[in-house]
């Protein structure tokens, strides 16, 4: 496997990077919900923590029944067991990244993992 | 620990999310290099795979001596051992996300980890 791999992401409803980039520590998806739409199901996870970043637009997450307003620039961690569903606002898309990682898998990071 | 946590990221040179969001499977940073600047050092990692996403602007990565052009929408996986350094172009910022995860830590994901 080469030491790096790059792709350019265009405007798709959903782009998944795990296989495209040969990721081994995460799955990352880039998602765009049109205005007034939502992910059509509630889901939780067995082992994976999810990290969401809102890139564009507004909307909300419903997490364990709680409404969490979302706008561009927001970042959100969701525990594996939480039941979640995402909605775009009536007038804007909701474009967001979803990062899946195994809960408690990170050991050192930044200063403790880097070699400078 | 609550089942979710949210923050709004503003325009800082570097924002680190691990402690702000109580992440356990990744560190995520949001970085902005002004035009004609670079990260001031080359680095590699002991155990962590890095995933970079370019949010705005243009620039390049130098990875093991190879120049990799970067623009908004590009996603890049870099192996732990690769020696890397990031540069903004002369005329634009380079705004990017860096996701650190432990190499080979992901097991199931999406369909095999989700509960719907």
Image: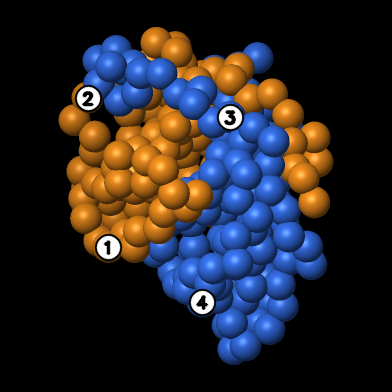
Chain colours: A orange, B blue
Q: Viewer-proximal residue, A37 or B97?
A: B97
Specify the quadrant of the image occupied by residue A63.
top left
Reading the image, the residue beneath label 1 is A10
Reading the image, the residue beneath label 3 is B102
Q: SS of the residue at dot 1?
A: loop
Give the left or right position of residue B1, taking residue A21 as reference: right
Given the image, what chain letter belongs to the residue carrying mark 3? B
Q: Are marks 4 and 2 in contact (CB under 8 Å)?
A: no
Picture residue at 49% right of the left edge, 31% below the top: A25
Where residue B107 sits in the image (x, y, percent)? 41, 18
Q: Are marks 1 and 4 in contact (CB under 8 Å)?
A: no
Q: Are marks 1 and 2 in contact (CB under 8 Å)?
A: no
Where residue A59 sits in the image (x, y, percent)? 37, 45
Residues under labels 1 and 2: Cα distance? 25 Å
Residues under labels 3 and 4: Cα distance? 28 Å
Where residue B91 sits in the image (x, y, percent)? 59, 89
Give the left or right position of residue A98, taking residue A92 as reference: right
Given the image, what chain letter belongs to the residue carrying mark 4? B
Q: Is residue B19 visible?
A: yes
Picture residue at 24% right of the left edge, 46% below the top: A14
Reading the image, the residue beneath label 4 is B58
Reading the image, the residue beneath label 2 is A41
Q: Viewer-proximal residue, B57 or A75?
A: B57
Picture residue at 39% right of the left edge, 10% below the top: A46
Residues under labels 1 and 3: Cα distance? 27 Å
Query: Are the residues flagged by discs 4 and 2 from a single subunit?
Result: no
Residues under labels 1 and 4: Cα distance? 16 Å
Label 1 packing within 10 angstroms: few (<14), some (14-19), many (20+) = few
Picture residue at 64% right of the left edge, 48% below the top: B29
Label 4 packing within 10 angstroms: few (<14), some (14-19), many (20+) = many
Given the image, what chain letter belongs to the residue carrying mark 2? A
């Amino acid at each position: 496997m080469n030491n790096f791999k790059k792709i350019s992401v265009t405007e798709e409803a959903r782009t998944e990077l795990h296989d495209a980039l040969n990721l081994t520590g995460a799955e990352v998806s880039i998602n765009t919900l049109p205005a007034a739409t939502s992910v059509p199901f509630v889901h939780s996870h067995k082992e994976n923590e999810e990290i969401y970043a809102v890139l564009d637009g507004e909307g909300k997450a419903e997490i364990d029944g709680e409404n969490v307003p979302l706008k561009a620039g927001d970042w959100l961690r969701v525990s594996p067991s939480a039941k979640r569903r995402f909605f775009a606002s009536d007038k804007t898309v909701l474009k967001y990244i979803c990062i899946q990682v195994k809960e408690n898998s990170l050991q050192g990071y930044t200063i403790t993992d880097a070699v400078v």
